[in-house]
Image (cartoon, rainbow, N blue to C red):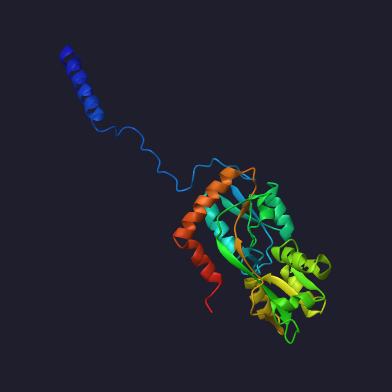
Amino acid sequence: MNKFMKAMSLLLALTVLLALAGCGGSAQPSAAPASSAPEASFTTVESGKLHMSTNAAFPPYEMIKDDGTFEGIDVEIAGAIAGKLGLELVVDDMGFDAALLAAQNGQSDMVMAGVTVNDERKQVMNFSDRYATGIQVIIVKEGSPIATVDDLADAEMIGTQKATTGYIYCSDDYGEDHVIAFENGATAVMALLNDQVDAVVIDNMPAKEFVKANAGLVILDTEYAVEDYAIGISKNNPELLKAVNDILKEMIADGTVQSIIDKYITAE
């Protein structure tokens, strides 16, 4: 190649290089799209997963399907939150008091089991915003002399679910000697059917399911207590609380939470 050809080749190469430089940086790799999940400044019990402790005997908030998987209001809300965090939801089924302790001690990432916010629980764990309202009601057998809330004072024994606010309220109002705490609501209702207790105090929605499934039971018209349900998270993980609460607020604002509730609780 003569000197003239070499010079032309160098000029051509320089022209191509300048043209590429003038293309707005298109030779640079494009930035990845921002993830919809919040930046993970929090920690979880297991990498890539969000563990929710619960007591899956509280329809329609948490239930076990015939195939052994879980469903319900809390399960779907938790699943939606996990998805937005870029995590896989894991449901850890256990007793209600154990579910509370698991979240409190950081053995689970959060507890959702129709958990009522009260001062005692706020001392040992943090809570999200309210996502549902719970109403404590009274189940009795048809023809029972207990016809109003005031009549509970005449009950020999009242059945409740262990570690729930129903147990706390009844113990405070009528004394622990007149209250039996069962492992779950279904066991308490079975005790009522077998005349081991005179009434059962439990949340309105599972109460409706239990009455529907067991002939001869009724729910009194008067409410026993009205409560707020929220997500419980360890005080040692405020970053996770913020991430969960931010997503929960969005889901409440855009109607996602209400649509999940409406799926399981139909208007009467």
* Quadrant of image for the N terminus: top left
Q: Residue at x 56, y 71 (%)?
A: 264
Give the image location of residue 219, x and y in percent.
Answer: 67, 79
Q: Residue at x 84, y 67 (%)?
A: 177
- Position of 16 compared to 102: left or right? left
- Observer able to see residue 183: no
- Position of 248 compared to 143: left or right? left
Give the image location of residue 3, x and y in percent.
Answer: 18, 12
Report how many numbered discs are placed on residues in the image: 0
- Position of 82 compared to 28: left or right? right
Q: Which residue of the protein is positioned furthest toward the left in this rendering?
A: 4
Give the image location of residue 54, x and y in percent.
Answer: 67, 59
Q: Residue at x 52, y 53 (%)?
A: 83
Is residue 127 or residue 3 the one in the foreground?
127
* Quadrant of image for the C terminus: bottom right
Give the image location of residue 127, x and y in percent.
Answer: 60, 52
Q: Which residue of the protein is positioned furthest toward the right in this rendering?
A: 177
* Quarter of the view holding residue 184: bottom right
Q: Residue at x 65, y 47 (%)?
A: 234
Q: Which residue of the protein is positioned furthest toward the bottom in this rendering?
A: 143
* Quarter of the view holding residue 94: bottom right
* Quarter of the view holding residue 68: bottom right
